[in-house]
Image (cartoon, helix red, strand yellow):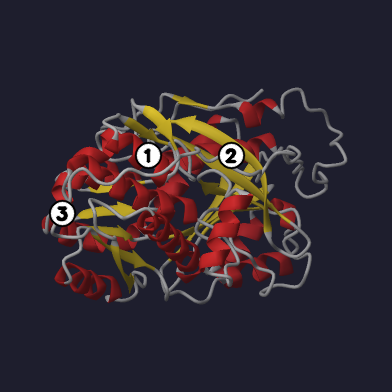
Amino acid sequence: MISLPQTAPRVAKLTVLSIGVALLATACGGGSTPSATESSAAAGGIACPAPSDTAGASSTATETGAVPAATTTTPTPLKIGSLLPTTGSLAFLGPPEIAGVNLGIKEINAVGGVLGKPVQVVHRDSGDTKTDIATQSTTALLGQGVSAVIGAASSGVSKTVINQITGAGVLQFSPANTSPDFTTWDDKGLYWRTAPSDVLQGQVLGNYMATCGAQTLGMMVLNDAYGTGLQKNVKAAFTAAGGQVVAEQLYNTGDSQFSSQVDALVAAKPDAIALITFDEAKSIIPLLTGKGIKAEQLFLVDGNLFDYSKDFKAGTLKGARGTQPGTFAKEDFKKSLLAIDPALRTFNYAGEAYDAVNMTALAAEAAKSTKGTDIAKQLKAVSEGGEKCNTFPSCITLLRNGKDIDYDGQSGPVTFSDAGDPTEAYIGIYQYDDSNKPQPAKEEFGKL
């Protein structure tokens, strides 16, 4: 059995204490003959553990009766801004995140809102790091008096606006930032996130590729905070598990030609290739498969774990796998999201966005204030130590009855550190089907 290594970088305030090994246990004692539900080992010796039968089941919501009226009311309604991508290289993440925000707002307002007033929401595009859209959108949101900004999705984009947002005394709450850099950022206690640091995703992915039988690894990496940060943690885990990284090819945001990097990767003859990219994967994957790389050798990440059914010929990605921070979107949650946006193709980070809205609203109630700095001071408290609840109505009922709460959401338990990071989280592992859609395969639980 391959145990998860303790080789994560020693980042202040962030120490890897333990990583769940349920997934790896399924690979213990595995012989050279895979089961019928495992991938063929023909592609570079890759034979990953079989998918779980329980992946993607329905969630169990906490039952609640009538929600009591707010004991404290506010003259200033809670106004939340979203800074999520509708253009740029992460535009595919925008729809599920925005749907998560809107679903949270809808459910909160259905039971009377926060502190006696309906919650207001203003949406703005974050774009990507090739443009200045995020700065312009942030200026517009701050000008409208938002107390909290949900976003950005990209760690690189958040780095361009975090000082602008937190410097204005406004809470920034990202559903998808995974760069370890934010753990030690001087954010005045105003930056929080529901997605775990890439220390965890990197360890899970690196070890998972090893359990699949890969002994050598090639990596295609976006040269930005997200890409190189995840690269570092994947490499550390894979090499600690006994593997060797034989090729690492970087490209820059805005690049459109990848032939030289692909040629170098293929020439190194790796058992597995990790694609740490955004939507550039749409151009990179055909180049790799055209050079003889099998889908089973490809491992994607949250930045490109996408429904490619309309992009590639059926079967192109069958057997490819990828990781996504957060637990699988449950069937009842998907139905609620589709009622908000029937055009959704994926549900990436919808749970994290939904939880960010709910926790912002609950912290505002706990603080009896809609001021960003007051809300931030209560976020850790509503995430731990109290009575468990997992919906806004059930949690707000407890709060208004004088109880301490511990919110567990659609993305997982979400317990926060003092730095605003989740201290425990799930990483979902997905497998692509015949139609090039990612399907839930395994969940890995870890603590940071």
Q: Amino acid at mark 3?
A: Thr
User: How far across and down, in percent of the image, does residue 80 sit?
Assistant: 27, 61
User: CB under 8 Å between callouts 3 and 1?
Assistant: no
Q: From mark 1 to mark 2, how far is it between C-alphas?
A: 48 Å
The numbered disc on residue 365 is: none
Image location of residue 307, percent across then percent down: 63, 65
The residue to which callout 3 is attached is: 74
Q: Residue at x 29, y 60 (%)?
A: 119
Left or right: 373 as drawn, with respect to 275: left
Amino acid of disc 1: Cys
Q: Quadrant of residue 421?
A: top left
Q: Could you give the CA–CA distance between mark 3 and mark 1, rounded to whole angstroms? A: 19 Å
- Which quadrant would residue 51 be assigned to in this image? top right
Q: Which residue is denoted by mark 2 in the rendering?
A: 244
Taking the spot 52% from the left edge, 35% from the top edge, the residue there is 237
| Mark with earlier residue (3, 2) | 3
